[in-house]
Amino acid sequence: MKFISILFVFLLSLSVSAQTNDIDSTSIIVDDSLTQKIAPPTSVIVEDFKYDDGDNLNIHWVPSIDDLPQDGKVIRYRIYQSVNNGEEELIDSVNFSVNHKKIEGLDIDSSYAFVVSAVSKNSEAKSNKTISLQPEREWINFNLASLFLIALFITAAVIYFIETARRGKELFVRKIAGLEAVDEAIGRATEMGRPILFIPGIHDMDDVQTLAAITILGKVARQVAEYDTKIRMPVARSLVMTAARETIKTAYQTAGRPDAYNDDMVNYITDEQFGYVAAVDGIMVREKPATIFLLGALFAESLILAETGNSVGAIQIAGTARPAQLPFFIAACDFTLIGEELFAASAYLSGEPKMLGSLKGQDVGKALAMAVIIVGVISITLGEAYDIEFFNNITASLKSFFSVSK
Amino acid sequence: MKRTVPLIITFVVGTVLILSVFIPPMENLGENFTLFFDIIAVFAFFLGGGNLVRVHFQKISRKSDDFQFSFVTLIGFFVMLSAGLFKIGNPGDIASSVTADGSLFNTIYQSVFVPLSSTMYALLAFFVASASYRAFRAKNREATWLLIAAFIILLGSTPFGTMLTSWVPESWSIFHIPNLAVWLMSSPNLAGQRAIIIGIGLGVVSISLRLILGLERTYLGDDSA
Amino acid sequence: MTVLNPLFAISAQTIGITLTLIIIGLGLAWLFWRSFSGKEVDRRIIFIFIFFSVAAPILFKISFTFKAIPIVSALYDKVESLPAGSTVLISYDFDPAMAPEVQPMADALSRHCLSRDLKIIYMCLFPTGQGQLEETFRTVVREEFPNKKDGIDFVNLGYKAGGEGVLNVIVTDFEKMFPTDVNSVPYGDIQVFDNIKSCQNLDLIISIGGGRPGIKEWVLFVGDPGNVPMAAGVAAVVAPQLYPYFPNQILGLLGGVKGAAEYENKMRDEHEQFKDMPTPATTMMGPQTLAHIVVMAFIIIGNILYFRNKRREEG
């Protein structure tokens, strides 16, 4: 009897393989109808998702043996959830070849069990139910320990140098040509009797570049008030308008000329990128400013603004943290603050030791980055070229330390 | 008081947000604060819109220089505002999309706004040419290297780049100008960009600390720092 | 309507091309000659040359074909390999200003996906992207695929404010962020979502744009955490920053008009049905190529001038 059944299965498999070898639409239909049954996924495991607020669980499984990259029968996996040993409910599905899923939005006080099913075109095979598990809350995310250490190191360096400077130690900060030229640029506008145009980028106050631009504006406005020069500041965001007005107003008060301040020095144009550019270009061409500051988050408009400024003969000081826009500024402007120089500007212009100290602290971060890059390049090159375990280990350690996974 | 309260808010919010990255139960705080900012920014739009209308009405009433342009601005502002607000000409009911085909908003958007925006963007073609003419001069060794790199990249995006080096064997394909252009962009150029990005990252840390610690106060209108 | 004699049409085009090349060539030769006598070129002359080099190829249909580079072919091959019924999300993360550069790739990708019977979920992270989406609906979806049904073969979710916040939600749940589509049809009634709960159920996501939020945010918030295949089409200026993402985080990338033209050419070369399809990017490669040549010529002129003046100063 056993022999007959084996013979039957053997003959059946021969007939199926004969049909599938001759691939056409009919054979595929026949194949499907014959192989409705598929194997379920196995070893489904549920575990707590590490470092969350107690609202996630992780499940993973061994895929069904019918889940193949090419012509596999499994098209999807369905995930069923049972809360506090209640009924199973379908909650999600994932594509074939996926073998894990993070279940989110759970209640920390409930326990959850899961069933994963493999789904073909016309059938479904369920796994066994997992154990019931309650999600746990963690108070510290140890996955981000390396990020925490780096942040702590740089923060400590910055604060240390601020304190050192506060105690009166002289700190050397290299000259930044673009900032050295600020006085000259304002003086030029004063001599020529033409206005200064200040563009703080097109992003809102939640962009640190805009904040940097506004802090520079404070220093510029103070000098503008002292020299009695005219300043124009068209802006693309309402909140920037409010902040800039307050900054210029204070600068005029500090300079002892509050009466010379006028709200219309800053006016809102539009949030729309090229509408703003059109308006600013118009102002440049009509009013022919002697000096233009292009500082902050600027995008495709960088070159349009800078070239128009250049065509009206203005001296231009630009600065942005958008690397893609820097070449345009370097080509079209007289001075460019490259990336970090924009953020350093307010400290540099103030000349206050504690502010300059923060720049020194930033340099420690740079030294760390350079050291890690050099060690990394050497270890990965030697490790790859000569397969030396020592260097491979260094590479692996660096990779794991600097990879941040949430 | 006017300065102290904002400074305290900056310190508390800044510190809490940094900590929230490392403390899972506080994770959603960052998202919530972004949401608060968006809500405030939406209300601030009334300030901006109001300022726009006021400035241009003033220009017209005082007949300042070029006051005719202010008419165009105000008409554009009110027509677009009404078209969007009242969904004029929308094929569906009030719940349908503001940009539905046939609506006045969409018509103005497609036939006025899109061509105008594209025109402004297109100015780049002219300005790139004039800026390149002025900037790419072999003034010193560094500038000469930049000039050569720029030439390779420009050639790489024309069929002449392919033609010029088509005789180079496939095993030396890196020297095909289009491949060389991609290499220049993805290796030396990217390495430089990353160095700048690292500098920017550290710069952001430094300025953020100055803001959180209250050393930097100019943005609050305080010039005493 | 006047029907032109084909011979006349061809000769008119040939005359146009010849004239253009002669005008630009002679003009540049004149400027070269002037540069040797140390005369600077006024920016307006540069603008006129750029105008001619951009306008003439559009008027006389001068275009160039490009072989697809591997990073472009990879995306094409992915779309080709997806079985009919697979679901692709195309996100319009750009505004009208960027549209001339990236709209052609968005249209070509929509055409390619729909012709292969893939289902498409459209959405945008830029408010003005919705208008661009309408453009694809008007010129590709409704025009070329009138049998494809809204809600069954494709769905338009429109714009949702929040950038990264939106991505953070749809990586686990579409309905939470998009309870209805752009026409207020409830999520549950949209057949495209029958087997789709979140981005993790998608077979491919393509972000078209280049700004922020854009492909980097998609990779960070959806592609990597959700383990979803991602691809992108971006403005040329952004493309170099994305090369390192290939092939691990993004499986293919179209960079600028050139990338789009390469994609269009590949579609036309490999499918008879696309032989006569509109190829705006390929058309745009004519102006771009000629403009690049003119810019190169001006760089050379600028350098001749520089050395000429330097020698004169030294002399």
Image: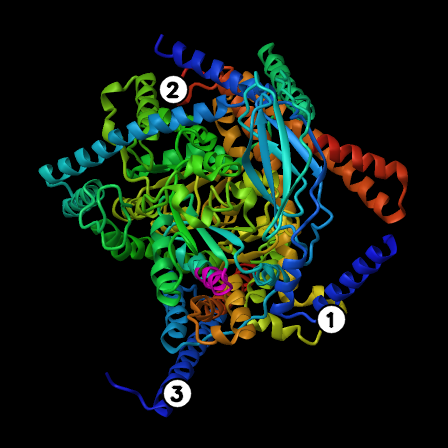
Chain of the residue where label 2 is placed in the rendered structure: B
Three-letter code, disc 3: Ile
Chain that bears disc 3: C
Q: Pick the residue in front: C234 or C196.
A: C196
Q: Which residue is mark 1?
A: B170
Q: Secondary structure at mark 1?
A: helix
Confirm whether circles 2 and 1 share one chain.
Answer: yes
Could you tell me which chain the residue with mark 1 belongs to? Answer: B
Residue B52 to residue A39: above or below: above
Q: Are marks 3 and 2 on the same chain?
A: no
Residue A368 is situated, as x and y percent measured from the top left of the image, at 71, 29
Dominant secondary structure, magenta: helix
Residue that label 2 marks: B220
At 50% from the left and 29% from the top, the residue drawn is A345
- Residue C207 position in % (x across, y down): 50, 50
Which comes before the other along the chain, label 2 or label 1?
1
Q: Quadrant of the C terminus of chain A?
A: top right
Q: Is residue B155 placed above or below A379 in the rendered structure? A: below
Query: Does C4 appear above or below C59?
Result: below
Kindly identify which residue carries mark 3: C10
Quadrant in the picture for residue A357? top right
Position of residue C113 measured from the top left corner of the image (x, y, whole percent): 49, 60
Magenta residue check for C10: no
